[in-house]
Image: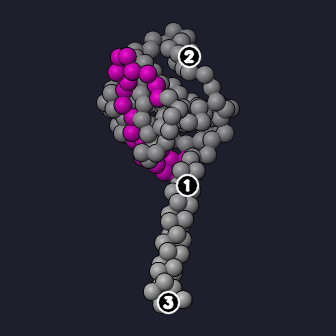
Amino acid sequence: MPRFVSSYLKFLVILLLLTACQDALMAQKKETAPLAVAQPMPPVSDSSIQKLFSNGVAVKWIKRLKGRIDDVYLIDLVLGSDGRNCKGYLTYVKSKTRFSIQGPLDNGQLSLEERDLSGNVTGQIKGSFDGTKLNASWTNKANTVGSKLDAEELQAGQAFSSNCS
C-alpha cells in the first residue's frame, strides 16, 4: 500500500475516534441532569399556591416564571408571596418532576428551600428577585453540587414551556 494511502487511512481513523469521543461527551453532559426523587405532577393553579399559605394569610402576588438551570435544563416556577415569604413550585419541564420551594424574600434577596413532594429537603435556591427576573444559584442539600438558575416572569398570553427539547 502506498505510503500516502496509509497515512490518509490513519488520519481518517483518528478523525473518527475524535468525533466519537466528542459525541460521547456531549451525550454524557445531556444525561447528567440533577437527580430527582419527586414524581411528575399536573400543572399548578393559583388555588394550589394559596393553599401553601396558612388560612387567613393574604397572598399579595403570584408569579409564573420560566427559565433554565445551567442554561441546559428548562424549568417552570410558580411563586406566591404574602409580602415576607415566598412559596411555590419548581418543575423540570422535560421530566415534569416538581419540587416545592419556600423561604423569605427580603429587599429583593430570595432564599428558598427546595423539597421533594415527600417533604425531604433536596436543595436550596439563593439569589435576587426583582419581581420579574430571578438570578440565583441552586445547590443540592449537601452543598456539594451547584448550578446557575435564571428565570423570567411569563408575559400575558405566554404559556409555560412545552417538552420539545
The colour mode here is: one colour
Q: Which residue is mark 2?
A: 48
Numbered disc 3: secondary structure = loop
Magenta range is: 136-161
Q: Amino acid at mark 2?
A: Ser
Residue at horizontal 57 percent and vertical 46 percent from the top: 34
Residue at horizontal 57 percent and vertical 56 percent from the top: 28
Numbered disc 2: secondary structure = helix
Find residue 149 and report its image quarter.
top left
First along the sequence among labels 1 and 2: 1
Q: Amino acid at mark 3?
A: Pro
- Tell me where residue 117 appears, x and y as whole percent: 65, 30
Instruction: State whether residue 126 appears in this view.
Output: no
Residues at marks 2 and 3 touching, judged by CB atoms closer than 8 Å? no
Q: Which residue is mark 3?
A: 2
Position of the N terminus by quadrant: bottom right
- Give the vertical position of 124 relative to 77 (above or below): below
- Give the vertical position of 89 relative to 2 (above or below): above
139 or 24: which is nearer to us?
24
Q: Which residue is mark 1?
A: 27
- Tell me where residue 145 appears, x and y as whole percent: 53, 53
Residue at horizontal 49 percent and vertical 89 percent from the top: 2
Report how far apart the C-alphas of labels 2 and 3 lie in the structure. 74 Å
Report how far apart the C-alphas of labels 3 and 1 lie in the structure. 38 Å
